Image (spheres, grey):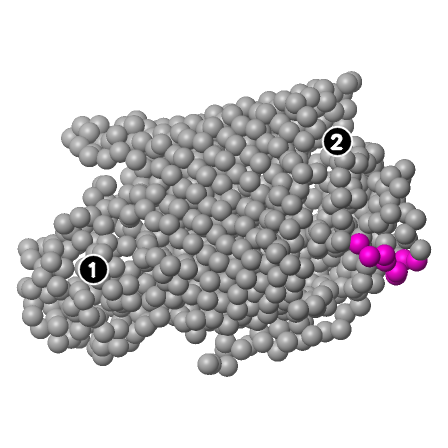
Amino acid sequence: MSIRKFAPLPVVAILATSPLSAAFAQQAARHHYDLPAGPLGATLNAIAVQGGRTLTLDPALVSGRNAPAIHGDYTVEQALDAALDGSGLQWAIAPHGALTVQAAAARGGAATLPTVRVAGNALNDGYQPILAASPKFTAPLLDTPKTVDVIPQAVIKDTASSSLQDVMRTMPGITFAAGEGGVPLADRPVIRGFNSTSNLLVDGMRDIGAQTRDVFDLEQIEVTKGPDSVYFGRGGGGGSINMVTKAPKLDNFAEGQFSLGTADYWRLAADGNWQLSDHSAFRLNVMGNGGHVAGRDSAVDFDKWGVAPSLAFGLGTPTRVTLNYYHLQDNGMPDYGVPIDPRTGSPYKDVNRRTFYGLKDRDFRHTQTDIGTIGLEHDINDRLTIKNMTRYGESTNSYVATAPNGASPVYADVNLPGTLQGSVFRMAKSQWTRTSTLANQTDLSGKFDTGPFKHSFDLGMELSHEKWTVDGWTVTSSNPHAAIQSGSSPQCQAYADLWASYDCTTLDDPNPGDAWQGTVKRNRNPTYYKTDTRAFYAFDTIELTEKWLVNAGVRWDHYDTQSSKNGDTIARQKDDFFNYQFGVVYKPAPNGSIYASIGTASTPAALGSSDYDKVSAANSALKPERSTSVEIGTKWNLFDEKLALTSALFNIDRKNANIQVDTGVYEQAGKSRVRGFELGLAGDVTPKWKIYGGYTYMDSEIKRGAYNDATVGQPLPDTPRNSFSLWSTYRVLPQWTVGGGAYYVGKRFGTACDRDCWAPSYWRFDALVGYQVNSHLDLKLNVQNVFDKVYYTKVHYFMGDLGPGRSAILTATVRY
């Protein structure tokens, strides 16, 4: 392996073996708590989470007990004392610095514990979502009248997920679309039937950089479903994904993970946190990862590393400052998958899954991301906090990839039938892009009362400047016939000498090591796109009574985007749009809610047919598309707040798309609709049994399209009618855990194929066996795609992107 692969490894080794002090109970950091009266277990968890502490407890001790309301500035220990007052319980220090709860008579000394069954483990080992990180959610998840799913770090670790796409398989109703030209080189999530690539966020701020995202620096992932422009501005209308990064805490700990697997897989990751003083801390996450893709390991490989340091001052005081930086570098072989069979519309089922049509001498993929963030937070008083975040980020995405049979309507329809004669034309697709973002966001949040009504609010302002530079590569074969596209007959049949230059290969037995001769040069003639936005928003959750709440939010955006080339402006578009969210919540019990809500989204015309704000002369005068969602649902926290159950009925209408209504006549009259329902569960059924998953049904339809469009009345692309996921683990013995996952995705039509291409439905099953050696070391064996199922994650009109084959990953985790 190259030295570059091991660049972060010395740091990994240091973090994984540092003898860090764990005792922390007597430090004087204070936190502001504003917790209502409620179940004791939930209150204790909230105190630990807010204070950045680890808590273990026996659920039987707190079952059926309630805690009083806790308001004010306290240390974690003081807040625990207040919560446990009168309960006959008290906190103590467990080995290695964790907090625990026990009967008061047994306390004795802070460092000596009686024999007690510890069922909760570390707080972040649970599957139940605790809260959403953004202050825009002015109520707990239980009382938020909208589907907001949180994937905690424990699910990410237990499933051995290393990328965003890995994690999202645990969330039904979300698929990933093929990239521009069918190149799957960046994350393109589809939520509730609509492309949500532009709605990827990091810590609540939009991140437009095209990349395949790693999860080594993530605390949790939050998925907001349905139109949510009121929260995050312009978008596709299906929802958004917010990635919450790990932040410094007033604690000392280190964790290192080392994984080895089939297909030459290896991964090293470490997470270290050092308390520098009573009010400051430093945290460092590093990662190195490489190997091949299981089932495609003859040629498809990857090699990436990342580092994310963060430094915080003023923790536990009214004024807090956090500085963090994120770097990810990812290289590998791009993979277009298997050609579509023109007779069936689905990928060739008789082609061996290991068949790879690319060229090692020509193809490459490189992405690099750098993001720096400064966060400032100040408690004005015990009921009012102001927060400001400033971020600059830059991402580069560059590739040359082989598209079997080409990727343009000019010749793909000609070349695809060539596969019937066993030939594949190796068309080169390429792109070079760089995105940069400068953004600032300010939130003023807090609580106040108006007479008998209690308010929890957030007011904010967002400013951003985004720039997207688009260039490409000129790929020239040594054979001039490779550049001729007459469209009259399949390329490989029209010019037999293309076989000698390896621009053509066989359908069944291509050789990625073919000695292709030619040149690859950057065009250096980019097109520039830039977008400026400014927005103001307000949210309020109003408690009318103990059982009735109203949740309302509004947002106004000013949007200005333009494109240019060679110093000349191509097009410019300006828009002002207003969006809202309104919901009513009824609480039949403290641990349950029933709600109804309505919300909107705006998709500028420059964004409507692209992943980015791609304004042109054709769309610059068009109005934004509008999406409206109506949702009715219920949420319940059961088993002493350990298990969250959710269900929702929803209907999304999107209108105002530009379509051709007659020959040469265009109007903004296009419409589409998605309606369906969801079921979700997350948390602990018992102290030994954890579960996470759900089911989504979506009935999607293109209601009105072009007058000559055959897709009218058909489902939206990348939108399966049924999808299901279930991941669960069970501790069969104190040291042994077993688990597994079952995932189903129904048939779905592909991207840009007029419903002539589709991906078959599939089931996939995963398995887990875990062994805890001692309090410092545990081992996990994950087997993914246990039955080696051949399935397709994405389909474009000429290719199907294969999911990974069966793989096994053994992970050792060391903690101090």
Q: Is residue 111 magenta?
A: yes
Q: Is residue 766 above or below residue 515?
A: above
Whole-number angstrom distance, CA of label 2 to CA of label 1: 63 Å
Which residue is depicted at the point 67% across and 59% down? 734
Does the residue at mark 2 contact the one at mark 1 (Cβ under 8 Å)? no
Q: 165 or 493: nearer the eye?
A: 165
The 10 Å Cα crowd at callout 1, few under 14, some 14 to 19, many 20 or more, is: few
* Residue 224, percent from left and from top: 52, 39
Judge whether residue 668 can be spotted in this image. no
> As rendered, which of 36 and 378 lies closer to the eye?
36
Q: Nearer the viewer, mark 2 or mark 1?
A: 1
Say whether disc 2 or disc 1 marks the residue closer to the N-terminus: 1
Residue 784, picture quadrant: bottom left
Q: Residues within 10 Å of mark 2 (few under 14, many from 20)?
A: some
Residue 9 falls within the magenta-colored stretch: no
Q: Give the residue type that dot 1 points to.
A: Asp
Circle 2 is placed at which residue position? 447
Is 90 placed left or right of 641 in the picture?
right
Secondary structure beneath label 1:
loop
Residue 18 lies left or right of residue 174; in this view the side is right
Amino acid type at image mark 2: Lys
Give coordinates of residue 54: x percent, y percent.
75, 55
Q: Nearer the viewer, residue 701 or 709?
A: 701
Q: Main secondary structure of the magenta part?
A: loop
Q: Secondary structure at mark 2?
A: strand
Q: Which residues are magenta?
A: 109-116
Rendering coords of residue 333 (x, y %): 35, 68
Q: Where the C terminus falls, by quadrant?
A: bottom right
Specify the label residue 350 is tagged with: 1
Q: Which mark is residue 340?
A: none
Q: Residue at x 90, y 58 (%)?
A: 110
Residue at x 71%, y 55% (from the top left corner): 122
